[in-house]
Image (cartoon, rainbow, N blue to C red):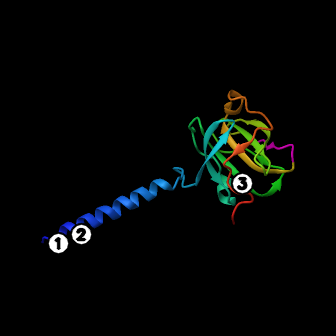
Amino acid sequence: MKNWRPIFWLMFVFAWVGCSREKEVVSSPFALPVVTLEIAGNKVQAEVADTPQTMASGLMHRKSMAENSGMIFVFASERQASFWMRNTHIPLDIAYLDREGRVKEIHPAQPLDEDAVVSGSTRIAYALELNQGWFANRGITPGTQVKGLPPFPPRQ
């Protein structure tokens, strides 16, 4: 029975290493990867929607979102983007970005509104959804650079 101590310590070390590795992986409570974006000196934790399934569900069925949190949609190719708010209960602003991460347009989107919020540009690579007023409250306008974006086009 005196051989139990090395086994105990070995199990403790494996458990500790396993827990510390989990902290390195950032994900949302909805099992999406999360990236840290920087916009004019402001940090945002954005869930990444880069598959047809995650893009289709977006922020649906959520009742609230933390102030500096959002969702970044990564399109497979540049396009004219269009979003609606079906089953989305949070008032949002949608910033449409080009492939270099520059804000091209910012549009408000009202909860549960099924009218399309369409980009004017046909060269949109990303869409960033944040709480309504987030961009205006920080003086962020078209032309602002967003840093830390996931790769474009997304890995398939």
Element under disc 2: helix
User: Residue 149: image x %, image y %?
Assistant: 68, 50
What is the x, y in percent for residue 67? 58, 35
What label does residue 3 carry, if any? 1
* Magenta stretch: dominant secondary structure: loop
Residue 123, percent from left and from top: 85, 51
Q: Position of residue 137 (x, y in %)?
A: 68, 27
> Which-is-in-front pick, marks 3 and 1?
1
Q: Which image quadrant: the C terminus?
A: bottom right
Residue 76 part of the magenta segment? no
Asked if residue 85 shows in the view, the reply is no
Which residue, given by chain and number where applicable, does mark 3 sit on?
Answer: 74
In three-dimensional space, the C-alpha distance between marks 1 and 2, rounded to whole angstroms, equals: 7 Å
Q: Earlier in the sequence, mark 3 or mark 1?
A: 1
Kindly tell me whether residue 119 is visible in this rendering. yes
- Magenta region includes residue 117: yes
Image height of 108 relative to 13, above or below: above
Look at the picture and state if 80 lies above or below 117. below
Rounded to the nearest whole Å, what is the CA distance between mark 3 and mark 1?
A: 54 Å
Residue at mark 2: 7
The answer for how far apart the CA atoms under marks 3 and 2 are is 47 Å
Q: Earlier in the sequence, mark 3 or mark 2?
A: 2
Q: Residue at x 51, y 50 (%)?
A: 29
**Image point (39%, 57%), residue name:** 19
Task: Identify whether 68 is placed above or below 50.
Answer: above
Other residues around mark 1 within 10 Å, as few (<14) / some (14–19) / many (≥20): few
The range drawn in magenta is 115-121
Asked whether the beta carbons under mark 1 and mark 2 sit within 8 Å of each other, the answer is yes
**How many marks are shown on the rendered structure?**
3
